[in-house]
Amino acid sequence: MHGGDGLKTQEIISLFKEKNFRATPQRVAVFDYVHEHRTHPDAAEIYEEVKKQYPAFSKTTVYNALSALAENGFIMPVTIDSLSVHYDGNTKMHGHFYCEKCKKIYDFEVQEQSELENFTVKQKAIYYRGICPCCKNT
């Protein structure tokens, strides 16, 4: 259960154990899919794709796995469009650009911002919306 250049199942389990996060088969499968598919899939796409390999997984179980993975910092929820939450396997600080024409979400690098004094920051998000270069030229 892993993509060509991604993490092996044992590596994912070790990563989870480092943070005392229970490595259920559902969590491992969902994390593996999101980590391997950097297209910012939404929950419905993740469920449909994971179900192909694991038909016994229920929608609720997959959604619960996504929620637990996001809460524990293994994946990042991206709420850039109003239709659904997307998920990103890249949890390092970066921005997202949403193309209003093709509906794709693109990553871009940003400089790390300083911390807010006296605030506990749990998540940072930088979102841009507009038209991507590919759509702009059509």
Image: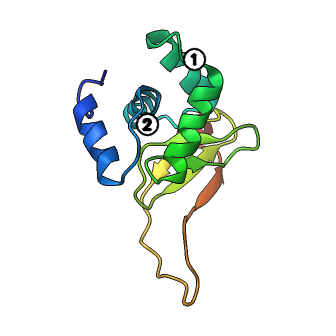
Q: Residue at x 49, y 82 (%)?
A: 115
Out of 20 and 4, give the one closest to the viewer. Answer: 20
In the picture, residue 134 is in which quadrant?
top right
Q: Is residue 34 above or below residue 4?
A: below
**Residue 76 visible from this viewpoint:** no
Instruction: State the residue lying farthest toward the bottom.
Output: 117
In the picture, residue 24 is in which quadrant?
top left
Q: Residue at x 41, y 26 (%)?
A: 25
Circle 1 Cα neighbour tier, 10 Å, few/some/many (<14 / 14–19 / ≥20): some
- Secondary structure beneath disc 2? loop
Looking at the picture, the colour scheme in use is: rainbow
Nearer the observer: mark 1 or 2; the answer is 1
Out of 15 and 138, give the one closest to the viewer. Answer: 15
Q: Residue at x 70, y 38 (%)?
A: 84
Q: Which residue is mark 1?
A: 48
- Secondary structure beneath disc 1? helix
Q: Amino acid at mark 1?
A: Glu
Q: Amino acid at mark 2?
A: Arg
Out of 30 and 104, give the one closest to the viewer. Answer: 30
User: Tag on residue 133?
Assistant: none
Circle 2 Cα neighbour tier, 10 Å, few/some/many (<14 / 14–19 / ≥20): some
User: Tag on residue 38?
Assistant: 2
Left or right of 111 on screen, residue 84: right
Left or right of 34 on screen, residue 86: right
Q: From the top left corner, tell me how far across and down residue 103 is, in percent.
A: 65, 35
